[in-house]
Amino acid sequence: MSGQAKRTGLGRFAQSDKPMSVAAGFGRRTSGPITQMSAVHIITFLLLTTGALVLEPPCLAQDKQTPRHPLPDDPAQAWAEVEKVHEALRPPPDWRTREPKAEEVAEFQKQVRETAVSFAHKAREFIERFPTNENVGDARITVVHALTHAVAAGDAGAEKEIAAYVASVVADKSIPEDNRAGVLLYAGNATFMKKVGMRLFTEGMSKLHGEFETASVEATRAALKQFPTNSMIYTMLVAYAQRSEPERQKELATEILNAPGAPPGAKALAGHLLKGSRPYEVGKPLEIRFTALDGREVDLAKLRGKVVLVEFWSTSCGPCIAEMPAVKAAYEKFHERGFEVVAISLDDKESALRRFINEKALPWPQHFDGKGWANKFALQYGIFSIPTMWLVDKRGNLRVTDMRFDLERRIKSLLDEQESPAPK
């Protein structure tokens, strides 16, 4: 899920005290409808149209009529400028507690149209000038994110610009498939944004969420017609199914199981949904084995005799970062007694993960495969919300699945247990 997960969920995300879902992670946006990673989240999106897109010759550069918005020459500074889009498109904070006047809405509508188009062009300039930068994938999402807000503000030209841009990206096979699929999915917000208009800003997504998610399911189905074997899209569909009402959950799970292009992991999770079971069982071992980012070999089966915290997280998840001091403190306090941490990173950018590990001096091993919410172990165990922290006892069995609170007491309790016999 490179370039998305993140989420967006995809610092790059506004921090929140709520767990980050696969829908939030995918689109990595917080000021409007969001689709998964950045960033997971997850997070949720609609297709630009439910019919076929007319593909134009690939072209990511701006045309002669597109005004340029000079960015700094340093890529990091340029990206920081592009990322200001999220704050620039937020409505006034006091609209959360009062109904804005008609003239205020009209003024903000004009502001959104101008600002959104400006940031879309900045993002396209970033792509043109820094084509190998790690943020190019997110920049493509940002183009569409900005323009869909312009659509909500009544800019008819933005809708046409989205269509042309998405067509060029989808047609460009040099772009990784997950990024092309992500742009297509996120562009679908245009349909929803056009429908709700300024209600997006005056009412907020909390009141529009149900309507948005219903449309998103149909959009995801439509996306599979162009990317019929894309694991990222199926991950989204499983996430929708997991949080749906029983009737829709059964419908979506059956659809996934019957889909020829659905990956085995998605089908396995769909099967659990239909049976009402989970892909893990408290009191039983977990199968987690990998080569860590730093080269260490990790195998939970070989950690018997130790208490292990298995942490699913990402650097773009605010609540994950908030938990980190407590995890690190517990590690320093109990490591000599046999406490270990095994981290499963749902990041999609290795450089960002390495920077964070170095800055925070995290000593435990990290699994990273660059797939974001489609991470091997996240799919294996149905992880669609982070942080998720599990505690494994000395016998190698999963004991606790809600470790965000009372961390040290629970760790000490398991460390104090005798390895045998197993507790009843």
Image (tube, rainbow, N blue to C red):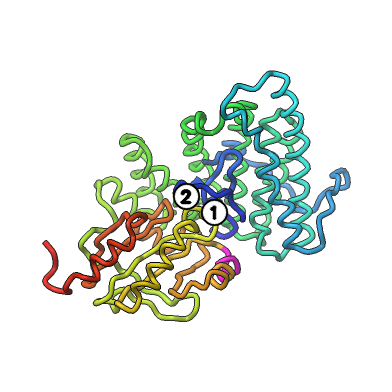
In this rendering, position of residue 251 left or right of residue 112: left
Residue 374 point in image, percent of width and height: 46, 58
Can see residue 195? no
Residue found 67% across the figure and 19% down from its top: 101
In this rendering, position of residue 238 left or right of residue 393: right
Work out whether mark 2 precedes mark 1 in sequence or the reverse, and give the earlier one. 2
- Few, some or many residues within 10 Å of mark 2 (<14, 14–19, 20+): many
Residue 351 is one of the magenta-drawn residues: yes
Query: Image quarter for residue 329?
Result: bottom left
| Residue at which label 1 appears | 39
Give the residue type at disc 1: Ala
- Few, some or many residues within 10 Å of mark 1 (<14, 14–19, 20+): many
Element under disc 1: loop
In this rendering, position of residue 77 left or right of residue 242: right
- Proximity of marks 2 and 1: CB atoms separated by less than 8 Å: yes
Up the image or down, 33 lies above or below 344; here it is above
Residue 61 is one of the magenta-drawn residues: no
Magenta stretch, residue numbers: 349-354
Rendered-image quadrant of the C terminus: bottom left
Predominant SS of the magenta segment: helix
Residue 310 point in image, percent of width and height: 36, 65
Residue 267 point in image, percent of width and height: 35, 53
Of residues 144 and 352, the one nearer the viewer is 352
Residue 30 point in image, percent of width and height: 58, 43
Residue found 44% across the figure and 49% down from its top: 19
Of residues 285 and 51, the one nearer the viewer is 285
Can see residue 68? yes
Residue found 33% across the figure and 79% down from its top: 336
Give the residue type at disc 2: Met
| CA gap, disc 2 and disc 1 | 8 Å
Query: Image quarter for residue 164?
Result: top right
| Residue at which label 2 appears | 20
